[in-house]
């Protein structure tokens, strides 16, 4: 019986002595030549291509082939072709051939088999009908460590008890019963000479028949492909890890993904423990970590639902033993491989006998601890353990773990950096948002701010409540384009600008126009500078397209003036619970500058609720109408107070992490009663100044504010005198009692007063200076008919009238 090996193109790559004896060609005459050259006739050579196609389609071929002997005669040979596994991945074929006309005796047949198969690198065995081994070659003796006597006469399940042995023996039985060969099977069998390691085999199982077709047993050819199998598993693990680990920029989720991907492909139990600074987003200290560095469990996974090998829960702070593998791994930065079967190697467990007993009871027999590193800095350690898998960890596994952790370490470090930037942006954003809303007697306010979830980071949504002169209050909400630190910085800039413009008592449409000019100026300045690492263009770019809604509520007239720059309209909840969205002029987003802003007025009765919000509350990726419907239902739901209304709105949002920031500002109106406001028209006669002082003094007596009479008379005297001397008719005096006492004098002139320091020889010019000394604050605001000069005074705490109690 002759044996030859062909490559995928049919070229002879191996040639045995038996093959030379059968057809007469020496190895130097046939190697590296097409096997078809041995065929006798040209038409047979043409048919060789068809035979090759059948081999590929059927994983082999069996037939009679006429072959030309070297001496010129023709031989009719019986040929069987079998596929072989090539570690390089290319197809190879084993060809067995013998002369059908020759009828060798038993002795010759046995001798030929021994010569052909006994020393073959391919494992070959013959089993009888009881599936007991009757013949094995040298390959199955493992170099003499597993003698033939241990196999002959015994079944596979008797020699190597395992689940895989049972499955393999079942395949033997099926081939024996059906007579159909089983080709290209792969199995993972325990190694008889090393119980801690398994070996991968590629095998063909074929029926053994005599010339009459009777099944005498089965025989198999197997090739050890352990190294190829381990290489394939290694690549598969790393490929899966590259897809699954680092799907988000969350440190703990990334650690959990690392644990999930390693179980059960690489280990049965995995724990990922990170240094506490890493979880906080901080830069871990350079150099090796030590026992003083706290480790916290960031992720873990096990093939068991719950077992003693899972020490604690995710988030627990870990206690390290000085001799434990984690401590050694942190100290020298090298992977540690230990076997629980070796007491000397796991001496650290002697310090914790209870823990050692739990681990051994759980079936864990091998540990691998490796550092998690990125950019040469230790982020933590990962512990791998095996219990169900019989293979103990070795240095090859340690190398694979280090490669896996190096790959995961990059994702963890990216998540850590993002956590640091995200927290810094959150701190910056929260520092720029109002810590408390300046609500008084005229407005009851409540708010919610929902930051976007990673990886979207924080955004530039903001809101504010700004007290204005004349007991008025401004409500503002805005949304900066983009996310991250630049959006937060831009938000802070714009919020400061709005507060500055609001202090000038500008109308809402005029205020937005000035804010639009500011954004245009920022963009133009940025375009004049080249972007560098220290000066990125994102800050100005994020300001462009910002949306904003500004509303000024006057509790005296109970009217609210609103203007918006591309922002969603507010929701108005009437006293009967109906929700409407006023049709306000939209206006362009800030920074475009091609359309003017327009204001609109709404009358808000006492108890009306105004809801200002950003588009994140509607869902940026959802239908806006759906979001408005959801908001309408939440606002119309009865609630005892505004905080409950906020909870209704937040609770109506879709489940899951928000992809965009969302801000909500609620304001319920409370207008000033008639007895809290007093107004008097005045003539331009200088004698009216004394009458104005008397009017104000009597009103303060009615309000039980006699303590403020002296300063109020002085303020009224100076303001009325300035209006008569430098202004024009009509002149009015108004006192407003809220949580402060407000004195206003209006006239028909737009001339702005100016505070100056009078010289000792000057006869006048000290009025506004005195007002500035006695009033808490003062200022000027312009109207369509002129101006108003106002001054505020704090109300004494001892004022106990019903009006003061309400204030």
Image: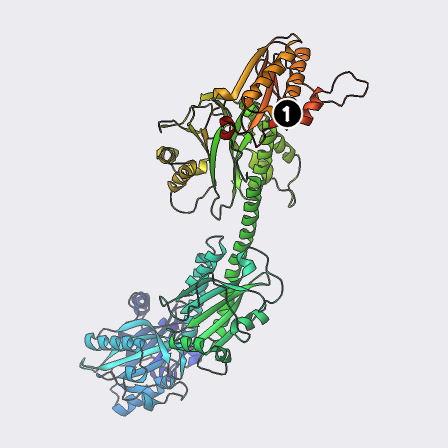
Characterize the local packing of mark 1: few (<14), some (14-19) or many (20 or more) Cα atoms within 10 angstroms: some
- Residue at image position (52%, 23%) is 597
546 over 582 or under it: above or below: below
Comparing 67 with 729, the one in front is 729
Q: Residue furthest right?
A: 761
Q: Can you say which quadrant of the picture contains the N terminus?
A: bottom left
**Mark count:** 1
- Specify whether 62 is left or right of 782: left
- Specify whether 71 is left or right of 216: right
Query: In this orientation, does residue 605 appear?
Result: yes
Q: Quadrant of residue 751?
A: top right
Percent from the top left, x then y, of residue 167? Answer: 28, 75
Query: In this orientation, does residue 505 appear?
Result: no
According to the image, label 1 marks what residue? 778
Comparing 364 with 406, the one in front is 364
Secondary structure under tag 1 reads strand
Percent from the top left, x then y, of residue 27? Answer: 42, 80
Q: Quadrant of residue 200?
A: bottom left
Percent from the top left, x then y, of residue 287? Answer: 62, 65
271 over 783 or under it: above or below: below
* Colour mode of the rendering: rainbow
Percent from the top left, x then y, of residue 65? Answer: 28, 74
């Amino acid at each position: 019986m002759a044996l030859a090996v062909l490559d995928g193109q049919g070229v002879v790559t191996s040639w045995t002595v038996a093959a030379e004896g059968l057809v007469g060609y020496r190895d130097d005459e046939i190697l590296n030549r097409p096997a078809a050259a041995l065929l006798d006739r040209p038409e047979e050579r043409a048919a060789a291509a068809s035979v090759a196609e059948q081999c590929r389609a059927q994983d082999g071929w069996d037939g009679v082939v006429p072959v030309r002997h070297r001496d010129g005669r023709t031989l009719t040979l019986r040929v069987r072709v079998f596929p072989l596994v090539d570690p390089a991945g290319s197809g190879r074929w084993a060809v067995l051939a013998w002369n059908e006309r020759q009828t060798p005796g038993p002795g010759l047949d046995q001798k030929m088999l021994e010569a052909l198969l006994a020393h073959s690198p391919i494992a070959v065995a013959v089993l009888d009908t009881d599936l007991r081994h009757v013949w094995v070659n040298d390959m199955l003796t493992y170099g003499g460590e597993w003698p033939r006597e241990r196999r002959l006469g015994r079944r596979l399940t008797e020699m190597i008890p395992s689940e895989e042995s049972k499955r393999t023996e079942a395949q033997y039985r099926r081939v024996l019963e059906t007579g159909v060969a089983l080709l290209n099977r792969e199995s993972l069998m325990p190694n008889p000479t090393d119980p801690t390691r398994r070996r991968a085999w590629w095998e063909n199982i074929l029926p053994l028949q005599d010339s009459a077709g009777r099944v005498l047993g089965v025989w198999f050819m197997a090739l050890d492909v352990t190294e190829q199998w381990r290489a394939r598993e290694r690549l598969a693990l790393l490929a899966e890890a590259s897809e699954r680990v680092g799907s988000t920029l969350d440190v703990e989720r990334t650690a959990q993904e690392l644990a999930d991907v390693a179980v059960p492909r690489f280990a049965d139990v995995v724990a990922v423990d990170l240094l506490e600074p890493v979880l906080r987003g901080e830069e871990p200290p350079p150099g090796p970590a030590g026992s003083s560095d706290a480790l916290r469990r960031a992720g873990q996974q096990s093939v068991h639902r719950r077992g003693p090998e899972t020490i604690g829960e995710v988030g627990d702070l870990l206690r390290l033993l000085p001799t434990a593998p984690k401590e050694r791994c942190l100290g020298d930065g090298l992977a540690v491989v230990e076997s629980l079967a070796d007491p000397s190697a796991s001496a650290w467990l002697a310090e914790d006998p209870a823990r050692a007993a739990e681990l051994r009871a759980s079936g864990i027999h091998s540990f691998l601890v490796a550092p998690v590193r990125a950019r040469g800095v230790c982020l933590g350690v990962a512990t791998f353990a095996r219990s169900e898998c019989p293979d103990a960890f070795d240095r090859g596994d340690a190398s694979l773990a280090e490669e896996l952790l190096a790959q995961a370490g990059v994702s963890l470090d990216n998540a850590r950096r993002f956590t640091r930037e995200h927290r810094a942006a959150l701190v910056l954003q929260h520092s720029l948002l109002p810590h408390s809303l300046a609500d008084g007697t005229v407005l009851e306010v409540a708010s919610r701010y929902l930051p976007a979830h990673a990886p979207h980071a924080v955004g530039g949504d903001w809101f504010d409540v700004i007290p204005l002169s004349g007991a008025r209050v401004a409500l503002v909400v805005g949304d900066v384009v983009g996310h991250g630190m630049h959006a937060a910085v831009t938000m802070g800039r714009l919020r400061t600008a709005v507060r500055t413009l609001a202090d000038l008592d500008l109308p809402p449409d005029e205020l937005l126009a000035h804010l639009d000019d500011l954004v245009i100026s920022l963009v133009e300045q940025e375009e004049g500078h080249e972007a560098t690492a220290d000066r990125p263009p994102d800050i100005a770019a994020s300001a462009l397209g910002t949306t904003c809604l500004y509303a000024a509520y006057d509790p005296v007239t109970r009217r609210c003036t609103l203007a918006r720059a591309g922002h969603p309209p507010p929701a108005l909840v009437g006293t009967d619970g109906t929700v409407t969205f006023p049709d306000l002029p939209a206006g362009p987003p800030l920074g475009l500058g091609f359309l003017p802003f327009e204001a609109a007025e709404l009358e808000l009765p006492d108890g009306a609720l105004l809801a200002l919000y950003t588009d994140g509350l509607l869902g940026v990726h959802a239908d806006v109408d759906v979001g408005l419907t959801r908001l309408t239902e939440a606002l119309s739901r009865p609630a005892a107070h505004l905080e409950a209304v906020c909870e209704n709105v937040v609770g109506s949002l879709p489940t899951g992490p928000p992809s965009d920031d969302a801000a909500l500002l609620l304001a319920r109106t409370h207008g000033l009663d008639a007895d809290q406001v007093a107004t008097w028209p005045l003539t331009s006669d200088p004698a009216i100044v004394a009458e104005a002082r008397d009017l104000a003094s009597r009103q303060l007596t009615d309000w039980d504010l006699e303590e403020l009479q002296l300063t109020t008379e002085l303020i009224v005297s100076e303001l009325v005198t300035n209006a008569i001397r430098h202004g024009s008719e009509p002149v009015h005096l108004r006192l407003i009692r809220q949580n402060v006492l407000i004195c206003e004098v209006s006239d028909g002139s737009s001339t702005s007063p100016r505070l100056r320091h009078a010289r000792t020889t000057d006869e006048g010019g000290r009025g506004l200076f005195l007002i500035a000394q006695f009033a808490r604050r003062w200022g000027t605001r312009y109207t369509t008919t002129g101006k108003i000069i106002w001054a505020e005074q704090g109300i004494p705490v001892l004022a106990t009238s019903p009006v003061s109690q309400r204030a």
